[in-house]
């Protein structure tokens, strides 16, 4: 079955960086687009970024463009999200999602908190 396990979250100061990872199993990772989505306290699920198969295209929400970078390593069946210049409004539970968007199968999430 589809398994997605996120890691790398934690506490960061404003302006700091974190790198999230998503380890995938149970499906042919290399042929799927993959996405990151997040949910802040009291808010709905927000799509953050997506990457097509073979890293053929990357896409970002306006709120993170220029600060976050999505990547993937198909040999390791792992996706990454490098988050720089973090802001308090980036505080959320971050999910790895199979497919483009936020409606596909997702993991349990990893918490990112940005605070001084």
Image (cartoon, rainbow, N blue to C red):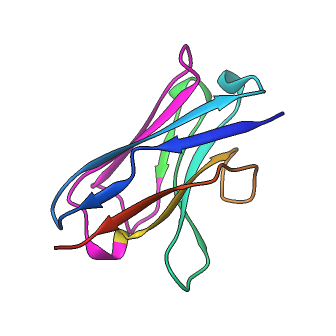
**Residue, x 35% and y 58% (percent of image)?**
65
Residue 14: which quarter of the image? bottom left
Name the one closer to the observer, 60 or 103: 103
Vertical arrangement, residue 48 with respect to residue 116, above or below? above
**Residue, x 84% and y 33% (percent of image)?**
1
The magenta segment: 60-89
Vertical arrangement, residue 51 with respect to residue 54, above or below? below
Residue 48 appears at what percent x and percent y? 50, 59
**Residue, x 49% and y 49% (percent of image)?**
59
**Residue, x 65% and y 49% (percent of image)?**
107
Q: Residue furthest right?
A: 1
> Is residue 20 on the magenta stretch?
no
Residue 58 appears at what percent x and percent y? 48, 42
Q: Residue furthest top?
A: 75
Residue 85 appears at what percent x and percent y? 20, 59
Vertical arrangement, residue 54 with respect to residue 68, above or below? above
Vertical arrangement, residue 43 with respect to residue 18, above or below? below
Residue 66: which quarter of the image? bottom left
Residue 26 appears at what percent x and percent y? 77, 27
Q: Is residue 16 left or right of residue 46?
A: left
Residue 8: which quarter of the image? top left
> Is residue 85 on the magenta stretch?
yes
Q: Is residue 53 left or right of residue 114?
A: right
């Amino acid at each position: 079955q589809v398994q997605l396990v996120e890691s790398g979250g934690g506490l960061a100061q404003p302006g700091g960086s974190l790198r999230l990872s998503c380890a995938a199993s149970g499906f042919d990772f290399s042929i799927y687009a993959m996405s990151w989505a997040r949910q802040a306290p009291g808010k709905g699920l927000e799509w953050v970024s997506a990457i097509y198969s073979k890293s053929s295209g990357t896409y970002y929400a306006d709120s993170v463009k220029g600060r976050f970078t999505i990547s993937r390593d198909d040999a390791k069946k792992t996706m990454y999200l490098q988050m720089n210049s973090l802001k308090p409004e980036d505080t959320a539970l971050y999910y790895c999602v199979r497919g483009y968007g936020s409606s596909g199968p997702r993991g349990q999430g990893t918490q990112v908190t940005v605070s001084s």
